[in-house]
Amino acid sequence: GLESGSLGGRGGAKLFRRSVLVRSLRGKGSEIPRVLEGFTLDFSHLSFFYQQMSVASQSFNGNLKKAVAGLRRINLDGLRWRVFDAKGQVLGRLASQISTVVQGKDKPIYAPNRDDGDMCIVLNAKDICVTGRKLTDKYYRWHTGYIGHLKERSLKDQMAKDPTEVIRKAVLRMLPRNKLRDDRDRKLRIFSGSKHPFGDRPLEPYVMPPRQVRELRPRARRAMVRAQKKAEQQEEGGNKISKGKKREEISERCV
Amino acid sequence: MNKKEVFKLAKGFRGRAKNCIRIARERVEKALQYSYRDRRNKKRDMRSLWIERINAGTRVNYGNFMHGLLKENIQLNRKVLSELSMHEPYSFKALVDVSRTAFPGNRPVPPTPKKQGLSILV
């Protein structure tokens, strides 16, 4: 009825992406209603980002081929480029937000049979945080197919080897396992630093939704108090840093 | 039913299921069963799709939004609401505002400044 008639595949999708609304709103930048803020292009951020990102793109010395690989395969018109800053974010919570954006579930024109998610750029992948003892205790396991060959690698080693893989695995495992999963993977561009070659595109920073952090458990709180006191003493004295501080620092950074 | 009808219904099936009567008969029976079941499933799927679209359209989450509309006794159904959120954003925004006033405490709160260090204990 209404659904199939109004959507009608790719052609229908294009009509809604560059909808009449966006074109009409281009004139008035400040009058965008709040409901639409997430959906239409937010032009106030653009000029600032343009200057910043054009500087960054000139100094991008990573793997340029890998970064722009497969861009031609994606039908890019009407899609936004959202930038996620992973610095200080908790891994799973950030991946959950990225997966919603990549699927296109934050747009009211979502349809499960076509892929309409925005391009997602993740910066500072090496500064991602995890809580608890996951840095040493979280293992990525895979079986090579030969009997007895179950291989594993801890988070710490994976971050040392390739920090972008951590976020990529986290997001991929949150996407639904269907035929669109590979296309959605192509829309994810993750960089371990803060430089990327997409400076010439209209980029939009993604604001993480407000999060209610639970208060520290008593033991962790006491440990942190002790760590704080030691840090204060160290500023005056110059004692040796004990190993137990590492855990508190990480949980402090993530909170 | 006779073979002619079976083959008529088996058009577009894969492999021998469109050509050979024994296989086609099985697949056609299954297809008819699926279509019976899915005529009922379609109504459920469409409703969940409308709910997903409404959820995407509001910044407030879906549950709070519908609760607010219920309080204001707005009888629009989810189908219409999803169409509004797609094609009529301004009207939809008005509805979201109505829901927010009816069911307060839904304004997106700016994140409170984090307390660092020992001040957490205070």
Image (cartoon, helix red, strand yellow):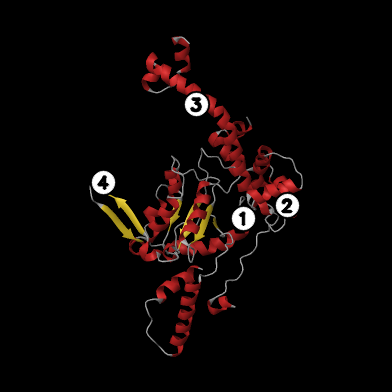
The chain letter for the residue carrying disc 2 is B
Q: Are marks 4 and 1 on the same chain?
A: yes
Viewer-closest of A52 and A129? A129
SS of the residue at dot 3?
Answer: helix
Question: Which mark is nearer the camera, 4 or 3?
Answer: 3
- The number of numbered discs placed on residues in the rendered structure image is 4
Q: Which residue is mark 2?
A: B97
- The image position of residue A188, as x and y in percent, is 45, 52
- Hey, what amino acid is under mark 3? Tyr
Q: Residue at x 73, y 52 (%)?
A: B97
Whether discs 4 and 3 lie on one chain: the answer is no
Q: State whether residue A12 is above or below residue A55.
A: above
Q: Which residue lies under the disc numbered 1?
A: A42
Q: Secondary structure at mark 4?
A: loop
Q: Quadrant of residue A125?
A: bottom left
Disc 2, SS: helix
Q: Which residue is mark 4?
A: A145
Say which of marks 4 and 2 sits in front.
4
The amino acid type, in three-letter code, at marker 1 is Asp
Nearest to N terminus: mark 4 or mark 1: 1
